[in-house]
Image (tube, grey):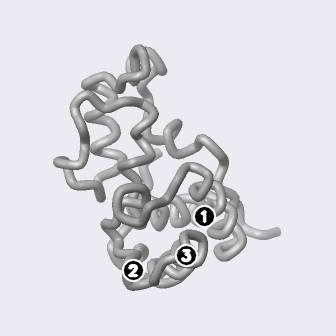
Amino acid sequence: MSTNITKEEIAAIFPKVADTMADALGCDTDKVTLDASLINDLGAESIDFLDIIFRLERTFKVKIPRGKIVEEARGPLSEAEFEQGGVVTAAGVERLKAFLSEVPADRFPNPLKTADIARLFTTETFCKMVIRQQKNKPPAA
């Protein structure tokens, strides 16, 4: 299920996402651009991802399942088709490039280690995550 997300939808929540990230990472909001890599540009560590996700869940009243990003990114590919020996396969990289369409192609290292997938995540990746969860949310009864 690929939900198309518009630039308008992203623009609508970006300021709140940027504030949330700047808070979590202790950096200036103006450093948090849509294409900023959380790890490479904003100095996030894996522990920060949990904090950011927790804060985004609270801010936007959505539930972001842990590990869901990589699972969604993998799409229809089996784990073996997606990665082998800790390295993402060519098919896996193609799938990630499509899923993380906001990430410039030149940021994908070759070979791409599974452990480095998170290095690709940008502020926009998290905006899309929130929007996806908002769209998947069952309407309040």
Q: Which residue is mark 1?
A: 52
- Label of residue 1 in the image: none
Residue drawn at the location 65% of the way across and 45% of the way down: 66
Point out residue 138 in the picture as x, y percentages from the top left corner: 70, 60
Which numbered disc, 3 or 1, marks the residue that appears first in the sequence?
A: 3
Which numbered disc, 3 or 2, marks the residue that appears first in the sequence?
A: 2
Q: Which residue is mark 2?
A: 11
State whether residue 132 appears in this view.
yes
Crowding around mark 1 (Cα neighbors within 10 Å: few <14, some 14 to 19, many 20+) is: many
The answer to whether 89 is drawn above or below residue 128 in the figure is: above
Query: What secondary structure is marked by label 1?
Result: helix
Residue drawn at the location 60% of the way across and 64% of the way down: 52
**Amino acid type shown at disc 1:** Ile
State whether residue 75 appears in this view.
no
Point out residue 113 in the picture as x, y percentages from the top left corner: 37, 30
Give the camera-side residue of 112 and 4. Answer: 112
Horizontal arrangement in the rendering, residue 77 relative to residue 52 (left or right)? left
- Label of residue 26 in the image: 3
The answer to whether 104 is drawn above or below residue 69 in the figure is: below
Residue drawn at the location 47% of the way across and 67% of the way down: 127
**Amino acid type shown at disc 3:** Gly
Crowding around mark 3 (Cα neighbors within 10 Å: few <14, some 14 to 19, many 20+) is: few
Query: What secondary structure is marked by label 3?
Result: loop
**Amino acid type shown at disc 2:** Ala
Mark 1 and mark 3 in contact (Cβ < 8 Å)? no
Residue drawn at the location 44% of the way across and 15% of the way down: 80
The answer to whether 10 is drawn above or below residue 12 in the figure is: above
